[in-house]
Structures are given as C-alpha cells and as structure tokens.
C-alpha cells in the first residue's frame, strides 16, 4: 500500500499529517502509528469499532453489501463449488491448489488426524459433564506439551507442521470431547474417510454397530465448516493475533482463540440461538420475545441476530438457511417447529422498525444450530464445531502476522480515569 495521501489533524495549535493508507478495496485507513510520539495523545476506540489492527490479504468483508471473500473468492461460490480442505489450502497459501497440491495437502492432513495416545488420559481429568468447550480449551492448550517439536515459531517448518496438526487434530479432539461427555468410547479417525465424514464417524459411530456416513450429511457438514472458516479480524481472531504477538506457541494461541469464541456474543451464540428458539417454542410467543429484545431494561437479545460488520445481511446466514431446508428434508424432518419459529422470527424481526433502524439481521449463528441439532448434535457441541471450523482461519491469520516483518507485540494504551496520585494511609488512620 503506498501512502500517497494524508489527512491533517490540528491539535493545540499544532497540525499533524496522518498518512492515508489505500486498500485493495474497502475503507481507507488513517495511519496513526506516529501520533502519540508526535502529539502526545492516544486515540480512543473501545471495542475497536473504527480501528484497523493490521493489514491482511486473507479475508474481505463488505458489511453494507453483505459480501464475504476468502482470498478474493466469494463465500457463496466456495460453499457451492469447493470443499473445506481446499478452502483450508486457499486460506493458508493464498491460491486454490492444483490437483496434485490438493492431493498432497489432503494426505498430509489425513495422516495427522490421530492424537497422542497419552491424550486419552488427559481427557479423563475432566468431569463427564464438562462443557466440550472447556475440554477443548484445555486439551488444545496442552498440545504444546504433546507436540513440543512444532512450537518454535521462528522455524517456518515448525509453523507449517503446527498448522497441519491443528487443522487435522481439532475434529478428533472435538469428537473426543463429545464422546467423553456422553460416556461413549473414543473413536479413532479413519484415513479412507474425507474430513467431514471422518468427523461425523468419530462423533456418531459406536463399536457395537457399523456406522455409514450419509454423503449428503457429510456435504452439509463440510459446507458448515467452510462457512465458518475465517472472518477477518473478529474477536477470537484478534485474540489469536494478540497472543501470537507475544511469541506464544501456536497451540497456546489457538486455545486462547477457542476461549474467546466461547462467549455468547461471539461463537457461543449458535448454542444460545437454538436454546432461545426452543424457549420461544411456538410462533405465537414470538411477539413477547421481540418486545423483550427491544426493551432497554431487559438484557435479553435475540441470539443469532446482529453483527458488528454486517448491516444488511450475513451472506453465511443465507447459505445456512438454504442448507437447513435441505438437511431437514433429507432427514425427513418436516414442519420442524424450531425451524418454523426461526423463519417466522426472522420475518417478523426484519419488518420491525427497531431491527430495521438498528440494522439487525440473522447472522451465521441463527440457522446453524437447527442443522446441527437435526444431525444429532447436542447444543453443547455447536460452538466446538465452530471452533474446529475456524481453526484454519486463526492459523492463517497467525501465520500472516508471524511472517510480517512489521510484527510487534500488541500493547494498547488507555484513557486513565482513576484516582490521582495519593499517599498511603495506615489502617489505624483510615
Ligand atoms: C459472531 O465479528 C465477527 O465476524 C463474528 C462472527 C465471526 O464469524 O467471527 O461473525 C461470529 O460472533 C456472530 C455474532 C453472534 N452473536 C450473536 O448473535 C449475539 C447477539 N448479537 C449481539 O450481541 C450483537 O449484535 C453483536 C455482539 C453481534 C454485535 O454487537 P455490536 O456491534 O457491539 O453492536 P451493539 O451491541 O452496540 O448493538 C447495536 C444496537 C444496540 O442498541 P443501542 O445500544 O444502540 O440502543 O443494537 C442492539 C443493541 O442493544 N442489538 C440488539 C441485538 N444486537 C444488537 N438488540 C436485540 N437483539 C440483538 N441481537
């Protein structure tokens, strides 16, 4: 980016030139890196509503047009024509692979899907009723103890191995977290299965019976992985970047991303959205919940609605809604009350002045839970599935940051509004 233009800031009778950085597409960026050094002032932006934390070549979002591109390819095309491991290759290396590159990449991932056998004991330290996200945060963080030979971030080869290990092992770990929570034995990955089929097999097969994955369900699962793969500088990706900026190893950084994703305002919304739809239960109760969502004194929010960036519609939600119809039809689930409530809730909300004025639309988490529930997953597995899907995005963004010569530790400042300097008072005099 050439900083050909600049903005002028006049402050305390001084004027400062702020270079304007020009993107490929999207808003221009004011470069304020030298502002504190020149003007002794900070900028103030809690929640980072107007802040670009980095430059990136990976994902582009246009919130007004409802566009999402991975390396320039629209999500609608990738969801329809590509598959998750090809999207992983695209996000990691920047280009779509040729046939040989794809075959090699898929083979490398396939041959890293097993986890260290000692990890089985690690799981046994958790209570059976532990939320699978708690287990995943712990187990993924512990990977730095099991795979110490791919933690040196200065070694490009170790960074590459860590990336492949994380993409390959997250489905195995998520499936193990699920099996552990329901008291069933762990199921090993099968190399002859594709990525999505392998995950479904590890979750739903049992030693006592043969389990054949339905290819149509595997396709729907794979599409869900693709829709969640990356999303620019969202909260969990920013967490991974900030953790990585200190030089922490990749497994610790991804564990930090999983922890952040768990929040109900972020990836935890898919679990909260389905629980909300089930709580509403029937279409006639929707107005009561719409009123609560609009009531300033009620903390209730319509889970699966709204987005910091999308102010028109979330393109992922559109694909997910189509997929929900397909999967329920495939499974012979007609007139699913939860899907009916979801569709009616969307219709009512989108015609309501409050939601129109605040630009609140269904996001990626609104319909995903309906599909996952129909597939047989409990709500507690929704965010672990989001986490395993997003691992490639986190890793691609982490690799981009580590490889950036400008990379330095992230260290924001603050607007201090606490006490002024004062002297200590002995307890006897307080
Ligand atoms: C994800 O960033 C990403 O890209 C995230 C993600 C990704 O792929 O990584 O897309 C995944 O996290 C999707 C979002 C999932 N979260 C939810 O569905 C939870 C419900 N949504 C809200 O919590 C909220 O919409 C956020 C957190 C998603 C966005 O919050 P913002 O951008 O900080 O907006 P805000 O909270 O300031 O809301 C603006 C206004 C507020 O009213 P006012 O204070 O202006 O009067 O809209 C209201 C909010 O009260 N509002 C809602 C609402 N969301 C916002 N009112 C009712 N229901 C909602 N869902």
Image (cartoon, rainbow, N blue to C red):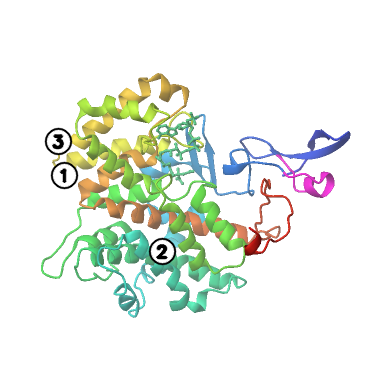
Tell me the mark number nearer the camera, choosing from 1 and 2.
Answer: 2
Furthest-right residue in this view: 13
Q: Position of residue 82 (x, y in %)?
A: 39, 48
Q: Position of residue 355 (x, y in %)?
A: 41, 25
Q: Is residue 104 above or below residue 418?
A: below
Compare marks 3 and 2 and give the one earlier in the sequence: 2
Tell me the mark number nearer the camera, choosing from 3 and 2.
Answer: 2
Q: Nearer the viewer, residue 212 or 258?
A: 258
Q: In whole angstroms, how far apart are the C-alphas of marks 3 and 2?
A: 36 Å
What residue is rendered at 36% in x and 42% in y? 365
Q: Quadrant of the C terminus?
A: bottom right
What residue is rendered at 24% in x and 31% in y? 341
Compare marks 1 and 2 and give the one earlier in the sequence: 2
* Crowdedness near tag 1: few (<14), some (14–19) or many (≥20) residues, C-alpha within 10 Å: few
What residue is rendered at 51% in x and 63% in y? 253
In the image: residue 92, left or right of residue 350: right
Q: Is residue 15 above or below residue 94?
A: above
The magenta stretch spans which residues? 30-42
| Residue 357 visible (yes or no) | yes
What residue is rendered at 49% in x and 46% in y? 231
Q: Nearer the viewer, residue 325 or 419?
A: 419
Q: Quadrant of ligand 1?
A: top left
Q: Is residue 31 magenta?
A: yes
Residues tagged 3 and 2 counted as in contact (Cβ below 8 A): no
User: Tag on residue 137?
Assistant: 2
């Amino acid at each position: 980016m050439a900083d050909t233009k600049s903005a002028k800031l006049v402050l305390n009778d001084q004027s400062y030139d702020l270079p304007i950085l020009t993107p490929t597409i999207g808003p221009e960026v004011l470069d304020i890196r030298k502002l504190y050094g020149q003007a002794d002032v900070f900028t103030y932006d809690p929640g980072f509503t107007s802040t670009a934390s980095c430059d990136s070549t990976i994902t582009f979002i246009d919130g007004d047009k409802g566009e999402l591109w991975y390396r320039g390819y629209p999500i609608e095309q990738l969801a329809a024509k590509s598959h998750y491991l090809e999207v992983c290759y695209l996000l990691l290396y920047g280009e779509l692979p040729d046939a040989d590159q794809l075959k090699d990449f898929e083979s490398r991932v396939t041959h890293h899907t097993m986890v260290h056998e000692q990890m089985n004991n690690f799981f046994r330290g958790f209570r059976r009723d532990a939320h699978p996200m708690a287990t995943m945060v712990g187990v993924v963080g512990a990977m730095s103890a099991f795979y110490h030979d791919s933690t040196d971030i200065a070694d490009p080869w170790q960074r590459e191995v860590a990336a492949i290990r994380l993409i390959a092992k997250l489905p195995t770990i998520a499936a193990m977290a699920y099996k552990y929570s329901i008291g069933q034995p762990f199921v090993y990955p099968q190399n002859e299965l594709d990525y999505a089929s392998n995950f479904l097999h590890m979750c739903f097969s049992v030693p006592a019976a043969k389990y054949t994955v339905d290819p149509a369900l595997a396709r729907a699962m794979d599409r869900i992985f693709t829709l969640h793969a990356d999303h620019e500088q969202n909260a969990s990706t920013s967490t991974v970047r900030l953790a990585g900026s200190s030089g922490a190893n990749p497994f610790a950084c991804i564990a930090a991303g999983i922890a952040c994703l768990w929040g109900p305002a972020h990836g935890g919304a898919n679990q909260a959205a389905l629980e909300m739809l089930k709580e509403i239960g029937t279409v006639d109760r929707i107005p009561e919940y719409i009123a609560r969502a609009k009531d300033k004194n009620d903390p209730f929010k319509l889970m699966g609605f709204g987005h910091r960036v999308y102010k028109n519609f979330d393109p992922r939600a559109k694909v997910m809604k189509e997929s929900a119809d397909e999967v329920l039809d495939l499974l012979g689930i007609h007139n699913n009350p939860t899907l009916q409530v979801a569709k009616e809730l969307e219709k009512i909300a989108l015609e309501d002045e409050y939601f129109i004025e605040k630009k609140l639309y269904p996001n990626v988490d609104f319909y995903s839970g309906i599909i996952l529930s129909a597939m047989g997953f409990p709500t507690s597995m929704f965010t672990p599935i989001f986490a395993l899907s997003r691992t490639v995005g986190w890793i691609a963004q982490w690799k981009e940051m580590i490889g950036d010569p400008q990379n330095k530790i992230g260290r924001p400042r603050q607007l201090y509004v606490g006490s002024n300097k004062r002297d200590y008072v002995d307890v006897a005099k307080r």
